[in-house]
Structure formats: C-alpha cells, structure tokens
Amino acid sequence: MKYIDFGIQTLILAFAIILLATTWNESDWPLSILFAQLFMGPWQFLSSLVSVITRTELHKEKQIHLFTSIAYLMILVLGSNTGQSIPKEFTLFFVTVPAWLLAIYYYYLTYRWTFSFQKTNGGFLRHINF
C-alpha cells in the first residue's frame, strides 16, 4: 500500500510541476497550482487519516500532519465567512503556500516510510559497526 501511496503522490506532484511549467507565462498560472491541489490535498488527507487510524510507521509525524491539516482547513473555512474584504494576493498566498508546505512535508514522510533504509546488524561480528 505504501508504494501505491508514494506512486500516486509522485504522479500528482509531477502533474503539478508540468502544469506550472506550461502555464508560467500566462496570467492565470495560479489556477494550475490550485487545480493540482484539488488532487493532492484530498489524497494526502485520506492517506494521513488512514495512517493515523491504523497506526503505521511514523504515526506521530503523520498525526501532527493530520491535525495541522484539519486546523488549516478550519482556518480557511472560518476566514472565508468573515465578510471582510481581503486582498487578492493575501488570499492567493494563504490558499497555496501553507497547503503546499503541508503537501511537501507529507510527501517527505511518505518517502521516509516507503524507503526506510535501516541498517541491520547481521550475525557476523555484531560488536563491530560498519
């Protein structure tokens, strides 16, 4: 399962990079980032939720990610219902930057979980560390 999760996240991240590269010179390039977030966000949220419920490796880190994601989503919902006029640049920054920081952090956690290179000591000369 962890290989599938890592593979799907990698495909979505590659899709986001390709979208950003192809729309960089256009005036609506931020929409490509938001479009990629529509795929990455729910996938990682569901993956994080399942990992926390099933207590997989890196449980504590994934739990921190999940609760931070929930707090971020609550702030987005509460912030959108204020009725205040918020500058477009601030809104765009707050909608994209924290979301992608969470996405990159969870991608890193998934990478560590998928490719954990733990050195095991064999039976031969255990007291010598190579």
Image (cartoon, rainbow, N blue to C red):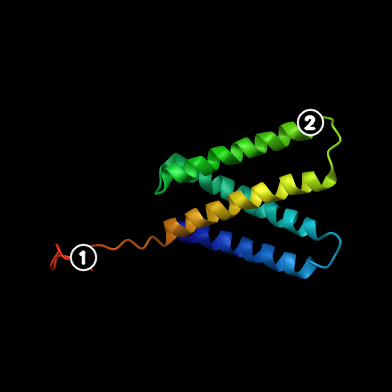
Q: Residue at x 68, y 65 (%)?
A: 17
Mark-to-mark CA distance, 2 and 1: 59 Å
Tell me where residue 37 appears, x and y as whole percent.
68, 53
Q: Residue at x 80, y 61 (%)?
A: 29
Q: Provide the secondary structure element on which disc 1 rests.
A: loop
* Disc 2 crowd, CA 10 A, few/some/many (<14, 14-19, 20+): few
Name above or below for residue 85 compared with residue 118: above
Q: Nearer the viewer, mark 2 or mark 1?
A: 1
Q: Residue at x 48, y 45 (%)?
A: 62
- Badge 2 is on which residue? 81
- The image quadrant that residue 70 belongs to is top right
- The image quadrant that residue 81 belongs to is top right
- Residue 98 horizontal side relative to residue 56, left or right: right
Tell me where residue 18 appears, x and y as whole percent.
70, 68
- Badge 1 is on which residue? 129
Tell me where residue 53 appears, x and y as whole percent.
45, 39
Q: Residue at x 78, y 45 (%)?
A: 90
Q: Which kind of residue does numbered mark 2 sit on? A: Asn
Query: In which quadrant of the rendered image does the C terminus lie?
Result: bottom left
* Disc 1 crowd, CA 10 A, few/some/many (<14, 14-19, 20+): few
Tell me where residue 92 appears, x and y as whole percent.
78, 48
- Residue 77 horizontal side relative to residue 62, left or right: right
Q: Which kind of residue does numbered mark 1 sit on? A: Asn
In the image, farthest residue toward the top: 82
Q: Provide the secondary structure element on which disc 2 rests.
A: loop
